[in-house]
Image (cartoon, rainbow, N blue to C red):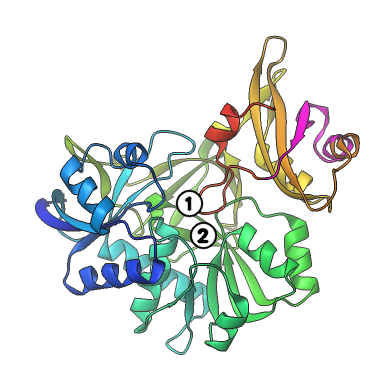
Amino acid sequence: MASTTTPVEVVGVADRATCLARIEDAWDRGAAVWVLDPEASPTRRRAMTGGLLGDTVLDRVASRGHAVADLAVPADTATIVTTSGTTGPPTVLALSTAALDASADGADAHLAVGPDDRWLLVLPLHHVAGQSVAWRARRLGHRALVQQRLDPPAAAAAGVTVVSLVPTQLRRLVDGGHHLDATVLLGGGAISPSLLADTAAGSHVTRVVRSYGLTETAGGCVYDGRPFDGVEVTAPDDRLRVRGPVLASGRLTTAGLRPIVDGDGWLATNDRGRVAPDGQVAVFGRADDVIISGGVNVDPAAVEVVLEDDPAIDRAGVVGRPDHEWGEVVVAVVTATSGPPDIDDLQARVRDHLGAAAVPRTIEVVDDLHLTALGKVDRARLRAHRPE
């Protein structure tokens, strides 16, 4: 794919409505955008931009909220997005207008969304999840309703009918007793069965559609286990691979654009999963998160779901820690819904559901977990955390 040196609007505004206005203005001009995490430290920003932005541009974004950088990107680039870097080095990706269009059209077809529907944008715009909401609304011919924090009554009053949420946001909606006559597209982390059950039992939303995707796939490309039209998913050796029009153009580096697919157009993901004969996709978790304790593979996301299904637990983060005898041991850090949970009961719960190898050696109760802007457990920070 031909690259050209193109002016890229670099945005780092904390106010989501202002940020969206800058993004849409750039898109109206046919320019590419690159939204930086407004909460990131200067050191973190430099790391997340892979050396592609100089200090002058970064300083200008920090002081003014935006700047223009000349970057060698594919000519049809709409946005540049950095992966979170929570499970490995951050990757800078170029997404084309064609990829975003394919993502938007696939989402609209699966959700049966039309021009009379209205999206709610309540996800960070430096993530592809937030930008894809903006692009879908734009594709339908209107702006999304923007909220800095989820406000279900205001969303309902504004006529919102579709909203992308992460599990933490849906849990807060349910626990707050709110109701929203909307389809919820749910992704960005492991989904607890109790969350789905509580949502349905209280008729809190119209329906929940589970989403799977990556920054490399312009966001979700598999809804409720079904890939979008034109998107193919395979799972050789239980490792998911994706091919289709939603894929990013490539990885941006100081040495130029680098491919993210093999010679046949397949993206090898780091996600474990399986594809049934009828094409149904099941996602098990990330391969690099697997804990090997005493020779047994333990999926931390599965342990988190079991812990969060206990009414005493609000959120759980699970990682492996080095151990001279077992290689790794499972440890959990949790936040409680009220008083201190019974640790023995929690360990017994995990043993009953997942077996002895998955039982956390320690469970620490904290006031707050390290989460990303999308509400995912930040495993890198959790691994570095040590009990007080």
Which of label 2 and label 1 is nearer to you? 2
Q: Nearer the viewer, residue 102 or 92?
A: 92
Q: Element at badge 1?
A: strand
Looking at the image, residue 72 lies above or below residue 154? above
Amino acid on which the number 1 mark rests in the picture: Val
Q: Which residues are magenta?
A: 347-367
The disc placed on residue 218 is none
Count of labels in the image: 2
Q: Residue at x 59, y 84 (%)?
A: 156
At horizontal 44% and vertical 60% (from top left) the residue drawn is 124
Give x and y (percent) for residue 180.
Answer: 64, 80
Q: Which residue is mark 1?
A: 233
Q: What residue lies at 30% left-to-right and 73% top-to-bottom? A: 21
Q: Is residue 102 left or right of residue 175?
A: left
Which structural element holds mark 2? strand
Q: Is residue 357 magenta?
A: yes
Q: Which residue is mark 2?
A: 222
Residue 72 position, x and y percent, is 13, 48
